[in-house]
Amino acid sequence: MSARTLRLPKTPSARLVLFFFAYAAVQKAADPDAFPGLQHNNAPVSAVALILGVPAVVGAWWAVRRMTVMRIVTAVLAAAVLLVGGAALYRIGPMLHCWGSDRITQGPDGDYACYDF
């Protein structure tokens, strides 16, 4: 296995953590009042985590497709996870134009400025 090979976690629950990581990765940049100034640009990492977390929801549903009670529990959990993923996507959407930049800051009017150092 080369150093560049990326492997997804094999269990759906480990993949679901990617959604919560994606949400947490952009907290500082999305709240400029609490964290003023330049922030690390974590939006690309957050976007990749969201993309890799989507198969977790599908995998969880596929794993319990024949169990009635677990389907209901999985549907409730999947809805919660997708809401968190949607909130993360809403937060990182305006930041994605700074994909290749090292730092990011939010201006008073809500737009993001990109900086490379």
Image (spheres, rainbow, N blue to C red):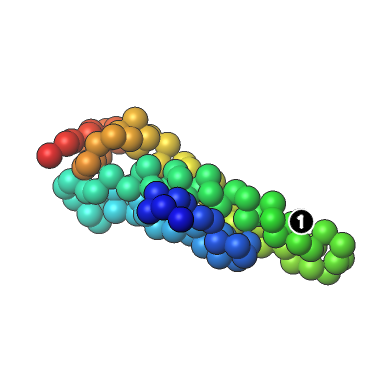
| Residue visible at 38% across and 53% down in the picture | 3
Depicted 13 relative to depicted 106: above or below: below
Residue 98: x %, y % from top left: 30, 33
- Asked whether 60 or 34 is in front, the reply is 60
| Residue visible at 24% across and 48% down in the picture | 40
Residue 43: x %, y % from top left: 36, 44
| Horizontal arrangement in the rendering, residue 43 relative to residue 78 (left or right) | left
- Is the residue marked by circle 1 packed among few (<14), some (14-19), or many (20+) residues within 10 Å? few
- Asked whether 8 or 116 is in front, the reply is 8
Is residue 87 visible to the viewer in this orientation of the structure?
Answer: no
| Residue visible at 28% across and 45% down in the picture | 41
Residue to which mark 1 is pinned: 62
| Residue visible at 45% across and 51% down in the picture | 5
Q: What residue type is labelled 1?
A: Trp
Is residue 92 visible to the viewer in this orientation of the structure?
Answer: yes
Identify the image quadrant of the C terminus.
top left
Task: Tell which residue pokes out farthest to the front in this image.
Answer: 1
Task: Tell which residue pokes out farthest to the bottom in this image.
Answer: 69
Number of marks drawn: 1
Depicted 17 relative to depicted 84: above or below: below
| Horizontal arrangement in the rendering, residue 72 relative to residue 110 (left or right) | right
| Horizontal arrangement in the rendering, residue 109 relative to residue 117 (left or right) | right
| Horizontal arrangement in the rendering, residue 99 relative to residue 113 (left or right) | right
- Asked whether 55 or 83 is in front, the reply is 55
Residue 12: x %, y % from top left: 63, 62
- Asked whether 94 or 17 is in front, the reply is 17
Describe the element under mark 1 as helix, strand or loop.
helix
Task: Tell which residue pokes out farthest to the top in this image.
Answer: 97
